Image (tube, rainbow, N blue to C red):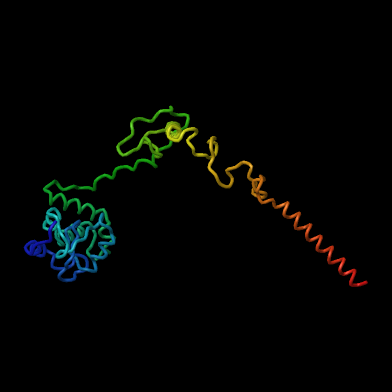
Amino acid sequence: MVQMTPADQAVVKSIPGNDKCCDCGMKSPQWASVSFGTVFCLDCSGVHRSLGVHISFVRSIAMDSWTPAQLQLMKTGGNQKCISYLSSKGILPSTPIKQKYESDHAQLYKEILKARAEGRPEPTELPKKAPRSGNNRPMGSISSGGAGMGGAPKAGEDPNGMERLTGETDAQYIARQTRLRNEAKARMAAKFGGGGGMGGVGSGGSTMGGIGSDPNYNPHSGYGGAGDFDVSAVGGVVMSGLGSAFGALSTAATSAAA
């Protein structure tokens, strides 16, 4: 990528309509949309940037670097060509920038400009969008499939992951996840010995320490073993002590009255 040479800048600026902003008409624009082959002012460039690069890819004519393909798009396009095409589709220059360039007609013009720059036949309609896969796929019945996988996984799918594979029924998904879990437990057992060394609900074997991990634990009275803090015993001692104190006070009071 290189910056536009003075000669390249002169060519771009000499294209019909490029002496002023494509969107507001301000003189001497210094910014460009590679996507549409147009030039515009600083204020309008900010709006173009807000649309996202998938709509309008913005570059500075003088400060940014350019690839040969991007330069070719700018030399093939031009403000007047873009304005004329959109106007023929009922989209006037005064149309708000967001509404103008997010329209299907503007998106088709991008494809037309690209085809012209690359010497290909011009498209007459937008490319068909590929249907989304995954969550839109109907769910199969648990009883409708076997325990195996629903065919070979497609590119990018992980047969050892948690995501459902293309064409996999509920029963096949459950069977695969069960198999993966059992394989993981076997690996843990081989590595750590016994039941894998990790305690948990229904896992058996050794358990992890902590509150609730010992079945003898009682949140009100503790573990109940030697050395534990016995709340009931302490309460009895306290109450006995208070009783003795009140008795002593009563005796003293009686003696004083006599």
In percent of width and height, residue 190 lies at: 43, 32
Residue 45 occupies which quadrant of the picture?
A: bottom left
Residue 132 as seen in the image, left or right of residue 242: left
In which quadrant of the rendered view does residue 245 lie? bottom right
Q: Which residue lies furthest to the bottom in this view?
A: 257
State the residue lying farthest toward the left.
7
Q: In this view, does 143 lie above or below 27?
A: above
Indicate the quadrant where residue 80 lies.
Answer: bottom left
User: 4 or 31, which is in the foreground?
Assistant: 4
Q: Which residue is drawn at 47% across and 29% down?
A: 143
Residue 136: percent from left, percent from top: 39, 41
Residue shown at 12% from the left, 52% from the top:
117
Looking at the rendered image, the quarter that the N terminus falls into is: bottom left
Seen from the viewer's position, the closer of residues 106 and 235 is 235
Relative horizontal placement of residue 127, taking residue 167 as reference (left or right): left
Place of residue 251 in the rendered image (x, y in percent of width and height, measured from the top left): 87, 66
The answer to whether 16 appears left or right of 170 in the picture is: left
- Image location of residue 116, percent across then percent down: 13, 51
Q: In this view, does 194 lie above or below 257?
A: above
Name the residue nearer the viewer: 215 or 133: 215
Which residue is depicted at the point 87% across and 69% down?
253
| On-image quarter of the C terminus | bottom right
What is the count of numbered marks? 0
Return the residue nearer the eye: 40 or 233.
233
Residue 216, compared with residue 15, is above or below; it is: above
Is 148 situated above or below 88? above
